[in-house]
Amino acid sequence: MTPTNRPFHFRLFSPVFLPFFLFAFIFAGIPPADVYARDVTVGVYENAPKVFTDENGKPAGIFIDIIQFIAEEEGWNLHYKAGTWAEGLDRLRDGEIDLMPDVAYTAARNDIFDFHEEPLLSSWFQVYARKGSGIRSIVDMHGKRVVVLEGSVQKEAFEQFTGGFGFDITLMSRPDYKAMFEMVASGKADAVVSNNFYGMMHTQKHGLEDTAVIFNPSLLFFAAPKGKNRELLEGIDRHLAEIKKDTQSIYYKSVARWTSEKIAYKLPFWVAMVGIALAALMIIGAVGSLVLKKQVNLRTQELRKINSEIEERIRLRTAELAEATQRAQAADRIKSAFLATMSHELRTPLNSIIGFTGILLQQLAGPLNDEQKKQLGMVQNSSRHLLSLINDILDISKIEAGEIKLSFSPYDLAPSLEKTVQLVKPLADKKGLKLTTEIDASVGVVISDQRRLEQIVINLLNNAVKFTEQGSVGVSCRRKDDVYILTVSDTGPGIKEEDIQGLFQPFHQIDTGISRKYEGSGLGLSICKKLIELMGGTIAVESRWNEGSAFTIRFPAEQGEKI
Amino acid sequence: MNNRLLIIEDNPQNIYMMHFLLEKNGFEVIEAMTGPDGIEKAVRYQPRAILLDIQLPEMDGYAIAAELLRRPETAGIPIIAVTSYAMSGDREKILAAGATGYIEKPINPDTFVQEMMQYLPGLPNDEKEQT
């Protein structure tokens, strides 16, 4: 008998050989006199098919199969402790349990837990659509109705994922996956967001198909309390690496068993029926006729074939999904790189236009009449505006591609602020605005990225001067403990309460009526927010409609490497 | 002391702009569009300073600066980098490579000449800023 069919045959013969098995079981149950046997307590919670409690109250699932296999190999005595997900993590932190399954690696978790290195499973969210809905990729999502899991991170993750595309998507939610899939099956929604494991098990049953819309990938591990159980994690890594190489191993069998609905739920029934029939025949045949043997072999082969077909299907599907994820990530990188390169290429000719216009306006090349001066002034203004738009696009694409690098060094904050104020003074003077600077005596040296910090302040000042028609614009700065607090305030039109929330989102400019009057890319504040956060700081706004606004940034006095 | 400056830069419009501005301010200007040509002209004409673009095809500004510093005939000539590498960190990199000063592109016609002059040694008039 091959190992593949062992559980099935135990069941088949159990009535006959029960006494023998009982004896064998008791015998095997006596622990070997191994003083090194180690007790390992593993957390269990309900997230089928990864880990869950089966109908007999026993822990089951992919993670459990794997750890049982490894425990047997390593001579560990496994104990289980069931609870909720949160309880499991608390117990792990407090060292009450040694291992917790199904933990996604994050930087924050790595601070309190240890992880092994070889991921056990990868998980992601995927959109599953009704057949014929036409949804293949993210671009087909516009105008569709999508159902997500109530109270999960799905909604936020999905909105974040699709947010940049500006699609009109109707989001609905249901409390469990079953209800969600039924909504799509019945046509009340076009697509559903699910984790890949549930999706794999239930897609076909509901007449859905998978799409290339995949997001929020995470790698799943066993986690251990920080600084303890290193040797357990090493043991897991050693075996995982081995069994992931071998397509006939417990790893692939377990994944196949729990993620294929046919094997897990439908096969056992008819397999059992056939098995009982076969068993009866065998017992009647007593010594075992050749015909019977042949039949058994035939069935076994059939089972093996089905099994390997399903394994193959899963392997193929997993590979396809990994490839799709990779393609999506590559496309994103190409987009950002393209934007960055294009922006650079656009700047070179534009700088030439700005430079020569400046020379002509200086009248170094000869005198100009008033009309020529006026028109060249317009050329200069428009090209400077275009340059600032391109610079904004360059910045945001660099930030989004994770390519921005800050360089921290110490410098005097007060003169740097004076300098930025001088830059907006011409425009403020022209509009008749009072420009005030209030720098507290506590302001001294800061360790930060001077260029980027000045960029933020200039942006805030420019906005204030741009939107304020009368009154004043002021900058104030003081140091409180290890943090600098800098406020740019104005007596401009202010911001309506409902507009404040989206203010720091990319491409946001409040009220289309205004955006026609005040040109800009709508990227400035989102760049400010991202930059100040990269510096370990924050940005906040206080504003009342018709009363003015105050933008406050807080940033550490000493950031990054001290030089 | 001569009033000669060497520009090493591959964009004709940028050369023209710098050339124009410098000439208007009484400098004599020599142009080179590649590194080898620039090094050869630096040796031959012994300019007071070299305005050096960093992003050049084949031999880039860092390599040119290294070569100019290596040769005894040109080692004493100040190198002023003029480049659109506006990213933080690039300034330090080019100064570490031996440049005396750094002017950022796009050059501002209103301030370019003044910016350049602060890096010139032995300027007799009081326009020079002490650095």
Image: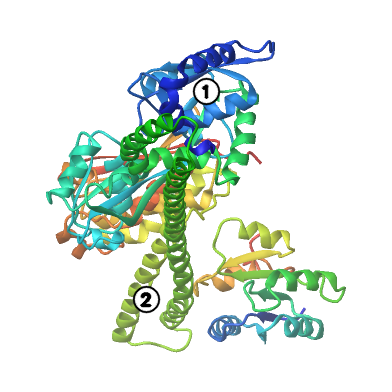
Identified at 35% across, 51% down, the residue is A526
Pick the front one: A201 or A333: A201
User: Which residue type does callout 1 highlight?
Assistant: Leu
Per the image, label 1 sits on a secondary structure element best described as loop
A398 left or right, relative to B41: left
Check residue A423 in the rendering and tell me which mark sits there, or answer none: none
Check the residue under mark 2 and report the chain it is in: A
Does residue A65 lie above or below A195 as drawn? above
Which residue in the structure is indicated by mark 1? Answer: A99
Q: Nearer the viewer, residue A179 or A37?
A: A37
CA gap, disc 1 to disc 2? Answer: 66 Å
Q: Which amino acid does label 2 sit on?
A: Gln
Task: For marks 1 and 2, give the one nearer the viewer.
Answer: 1
Which residue is found at the position 37% from the left and 54% from the top? A459
Up/down of A72 relative to A505, above or below: above
Residue marked by disc 2: A380
The reply, left or right, for residue A361 in relation to residue A159 is: right
Task: Give the residue at x 53% y 15%.
Answer: A25
Q: Is residue B98 visible?
A: yes
**Corner quadrant of residue A176:** top left
